[in-house]
Amino acid sequence: MSAPNTAVADVAAWEAYQRMRVLLSAQIGRELAKCSNLSEAEFDILSVLADAKDGTLRALSLRCGLDWEKSRLSHQIGRMEKRGLLRRQAYAGDGRSTLICLTDFGRETFAEGKATHERVVSEYFTKVLTAADLAALTRMAGKIVARLEQVDARPHHANDLHPVDDLEDEPA
Amino acid sequence: MSAPNTAVADVAAWEAYQRMRVLLSAQIGRELAKCSNLSEAEFDILSVLADAKDGTLRALSLRCGLDWEKSRLSHQIGRMEKRGLLRRQAYAGDGRSTLICLTDFGRETFAEGKATHERVVSEYFTKVLTAADLAALTRMAGKIVARLEQVDARPHHANDLHPVDDLEDEPA
DNA sequence: CATCAGTGGTTGACGCATCACCTAAGCATG
DNA sequence: CATGCTTAGGTGATGCGTCAACCACTGATG
């Protein structure tokens, strides 16, 4: 035992974090599914889309907003299109691109989901922690994310997502 | 704006936490897969199993140790059995039960995986945070888990997992 | 204009997670 | 012993996520 009980605390912290992560995700997933018939992935997509002008974004922009892989988005969009939450539409400005448009049904569903989501996050996260806790957690998360991004940005394989030009002007 | 900027801090904390969670999981998953050819789920199973006497547990005990649903475990065990990491074996003491046994290959693979896992957790989590951070995080996670369990344990649907009698004695 | 590299998106296969349902063994109780 | 509940585990369908491969279109270069 050259390293003292710091190691013990490290492991405890990791395990506590893991347990929180798993249970919290599961709870949010369950309530979102039960109360609003949405998965977390669907909710995330609708969130980004609902913030966009006309509820419409190019798939690329959506991907950058979410930090998703392109095939993941494509599959997800396919399923959501089948459910009528959104629809694909050709983009006149660039024949390779696809526009994703929120439908009315999608917008309604998102409104419900948002309410559920806010309730659950508040009930199991925000209200359980103090303001100081939240500040501390924000700071810690920032450090860890910075560390991860610092590694991720390096040599690697040209991460597929750099240029982010949105459709601000050229409508269709 | 009746509620002041606490709401802003709340949202920021949630988003920071989310981002950390997603990136950290992804990183661990990637490195575990790349360096040791294991998924997180496989690693978790092997961890519990490797701690058990003879690397053997009844499926029920494994499930309680992991907090998994039985069908999830069954599917996972099936895939891992196909890969040769473990094997199923009838349990003489109770015809309904199944023993899960680590194979030699499983034990080797776990050893590698454990090294990778420890390296990654240390690199992106433990070493990025201070001892005070870790203590604070442990405390926060404890509060949130307690809140979740307090809800989860209630009326509900008799959660499928209460009695936890292990095989301490009756070997086979 | 022909070629060709890079980009935006899709597809198929596979592993993973959950749900609903099923089987079979144990364990009552009559 | 027959009936019926509970418990341990498994199955199949479906959604989700990743990887690798695959177009189609764009834009640069000759």
Image (cartoon, coloured by chain):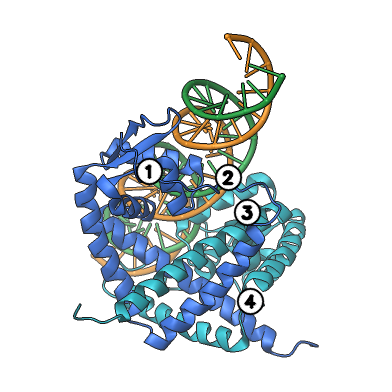
Chain colours: A cyan, B blue, C green, D orange
Q: How far apart are the alpha carbons under marks 1 and 4?
A: 38 Å
Q: Secondary structure at mark 4?
A: loop
The chain ID associated with circle 4 is A
The chain ID associated with circle 2 is B
Q: Residue at x 36, y 32 (%)?
A: B91
Q: How far apart are the alpha carbons under marks 1 and 3?
A: 59 Å
Q: Secondary structure at mark 2?
A: loop
Q: Residues within 10 Å of mark 3 (few under 14, many from 20)?
A: few
Q: Position of residue A47 (x, y in %)?
A: 65, 66
- Mark 3: amino acid: Gln
- In the drawing, does residue A100 fall left or right of residue B128? right
Q: Which residue is mark 3?
A: A89
Q: Secondary structure at mark 3?
A: strand
Q: Which residue is mark 1?
A: B167
- In the drawing, does residue A153 fall left or right of residue B162? left
Q: Position of residue B97 (x, y in %)?
A: 43, 33
Q: Secondary structure at mark 1?
A: loop
Which mark is in front, 1 or 3?
Answer: 1
Q: Residue at x 63, y 79 (%)?
A: B11
Check whether the beta carbons of the residues at disc 1 and disc 2 lie within 8 A of each other: no
* Quarter placement of the C terminus of chain A: bottom right
Q: Which residue is mark 2?
A: B160
Query: Which numbered marker is on residue B90?
Result: none
Q: How far apart are the alpha carbons under marks 2 and 4?
A: 27 Å
Q: Residue at x 61, y 48 (%)?
A: B159
Q: Which residue is mark 4?
A: A128
On whether disc 1 and disc 4 are found on a single subunit, the reply is no
- Mark 2: amino acid: Asp
- Asked if B158 appears above or below B81 in the picture, the reply is below
